[in-house]
């Protein structure tokens, strides 16, 4: 027995309190997932209506917009990486960062330079440690993103996109990497190209007996599109942030659950060793007593 | 499709604020107020910060404050999309007045301040209109 009984007891105690903490974090994450999912659900009507409006304009007018036109010769790409602010969420942030490295390699092989935009302190720390350049980063909202945050990010990215080639900070395409929430158990990092906007999921073709709604535009199709597309971009970013938040919480819950389970295992193991140590101590004491009694009896027998 | 009512949805970026049936909707576009009655032809318009007025089929009036956004009308469905939407009964009039005064004291320094004043004014207008 390498350690004394007392030391094992201390270890059991500290593991137990660790388990309490991870258990609490697991429960907190679990309850927040529900909220995050509700938030994602309540954001859905806006995204749906916006998509409908965008496809209406795209379908019923032939307007070209800077945000939808592909630059002839893309040279720079902006990448927005969505990670968490806090750790203890398993491989959540690192798998997003891994995905980003793959995308970088692909973009570089296409001869494009990369500007990085980050959200979440984990990505910031990753870039700082490696001394890489960051165009801009946003932190402090990873587990409950607000629309205003998405708005800011959207504005920044759109501003970079509409700059003329050659200007400082101008990019020709914008990618977003975030973690998609597929279920409580499965979250996967995905890459989407945000800008230039790809053909919007078209409205369903009207039934033959239905008339096409011929939209009037107030004030004009160009201006409506001008107002609509940035909002569409922002809503896509908001969607990505919400998905990322739900994924982060699910990853944290999973990580904390396995931490709790591991603590349980550890406690079991320590308890077993401690019991052995205790038993060994008792056995030793008994044998010492018995030995002492025997020695005394022998001595007495000799003197009589 | 019913012919005489509008199905209205007031949608903010993070929630569905109100939905229901209405007789008339008034919104403020970049070119001025527009009133939508049932069977209006399809329109897609840009709204400016302001007040949206919804008269329901029960004769009630709902007033909401919206940020710049979009409204679309198609087949008696009206959707009003804005990043922030507040219903008049959610607004704290005193607070709106305080914000307006404070913003006016500071003066219009940039776009943000002007926006704040417009919002506060719209809020007060909405509450007064709803009375």
Image (tube, coloured by chain):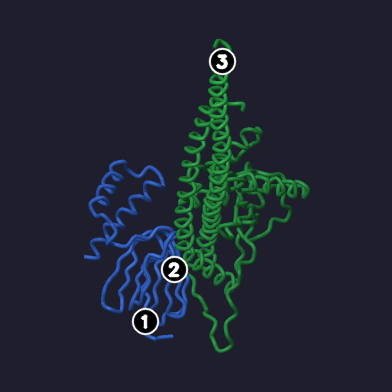
Chain colours: A green, B blue
Name the element at disc 3.
helix
Marks 1/3 same chain: no
Disc 2 from disc 3: Cα separation:
111 Å
Number of numbered callouts drawn: 3
In the rendered view of the protein, which quadrant contains the N terminus of chain A?
Answer: top right
Camera-side residue: A191 or B103?
Answer: A191
Image side of residue A99 versus residue A272, left or right:
right
Residue at the image position 60 percent from the left and 61 percent from the top: A65
Camera-side residue: A200 or B34?
Answer: A200
Residue B42 can be seen, yes or no: yes
From the top left corner, tell me how far across and down residue A57 is, in percent. 55, 70
Q: Which residue is mark 3?
A: A301
Camera-side residue: A301 or A112?
Answer: A301
The chain identifier of the residue carrying mark 2 reads: B
Q: Residues within 10 Å of mark 3 (few under 14, many from 20)?
A: few
Q: Is residue B41 above or below residue B19?
A: below
Q: Which residue is mark 1?
A: B5
Image side of residue A146 versus residue B96, left or right:
right
Q: Which residue is mark 2?
A: B71
Q: Is residue A229 above or below residue B43?
A: above
Q: Residues within 10 Å of mark 2 (few under 14, many from 20)?
A: many
Disc 1 from disc 3: Cα separation:
116 Å
Residue at the image position 55 percent from the left and 27 percent from the top: A281
Residue at the image position 61 percent from the left and 34 percent from the top: A128
The chain identifier of the residue carrying mark 3 reads: A
Of circles 2 and 3, which is in front? 3
From the top left corner, tell me how far across and down residue A253 is, in percent. 53, 50
Camera-side residue: A255 or B123?
Answer: A255
């Amino acid at each position: 027995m390498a350690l004394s009984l007392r030391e094992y007891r201390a270890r059991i105690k500290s593991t137990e309190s660790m388990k309490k903490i991870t258990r609490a974090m697991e429960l907190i994450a679990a309850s927040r997932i529900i909220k995050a999912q509700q938030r994602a659900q309540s954001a859905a009507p806006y995204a749906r209506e916006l998509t409908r409006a965008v496809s209406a304009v795209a379908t019923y007018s032939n307007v070209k917009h800077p945000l939808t036109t592909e630059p002839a010769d893309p040279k720079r790409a902006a990448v927005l990486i969505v990670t968490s602010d806090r750790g203890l969420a398993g491989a959540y942030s690192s798998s997003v960062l891994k995905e980003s490295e793959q995308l970088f390699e692909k973009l570089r092989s296409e001869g494009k330079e990369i500007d990085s935009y980050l959200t979440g302190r984990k990505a910031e720390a990753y870039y700082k440690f490696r001394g890489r350049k960051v165009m801009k980063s946003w932190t402090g909202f990873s587990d409950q993103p607000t629309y205003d945050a998405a708005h800011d990010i959207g504005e920044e990215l759109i501003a970079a996109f509409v700059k003329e080639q050659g200007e400082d900070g101008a990019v020709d395409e914008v990618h977003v990497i975030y973690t998609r929430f597929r279920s409580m158990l499965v979250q996967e990092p995905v890459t989407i190209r945000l800008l230039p906007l790809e053909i919007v999921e078209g409205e369903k073709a009207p039934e033959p007996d239905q008339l096409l709604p011929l939209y009037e535009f107030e004030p004009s199709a160009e201006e409506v599109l001008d107002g609509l597309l940035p909002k569409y971009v922002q809503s896509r970013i908001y969607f990505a942030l919400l998905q990322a938040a739900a994924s982060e919480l699910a990853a944290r819950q999973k990580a904390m659950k396995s931490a709790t389970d591991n603590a349980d295992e550890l406690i079991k193991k320590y308890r077993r060793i401690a019991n052995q140590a205790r038993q060994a101590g008792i056995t030793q004491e008994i044998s010492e007593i018995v030995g002492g009694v025997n020695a005394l009896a022998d001595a007495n027998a000799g003197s009589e | 499709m019913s012919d005489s009512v509008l199905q209205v949805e007031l949608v903010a970026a993070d929630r569905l604020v109100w939905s229901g049936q209405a007789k008339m909707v008034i919104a403020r576009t970049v070119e001025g107020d527009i009133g939508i009655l049932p069977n209006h032809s399809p329109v897609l318009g840009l709204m400016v910060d302001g007040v949206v007025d919804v008269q329901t089929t029960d004769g009630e009036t709902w007033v909401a404050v919206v940020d710049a956004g979009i409204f679309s009308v198609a087949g008696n469905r009206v959707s009003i999309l804005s990043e922030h939407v507040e219903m008049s009964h959610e607004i704290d009039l005193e607070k709106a007045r305080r914000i307006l005064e404070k913003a006016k004291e500071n003066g219009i320094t940039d776009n943000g301040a002007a926006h704040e004043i417009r919002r506060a004014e719209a809020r007060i207008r909405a509450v007064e209109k709803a009375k």
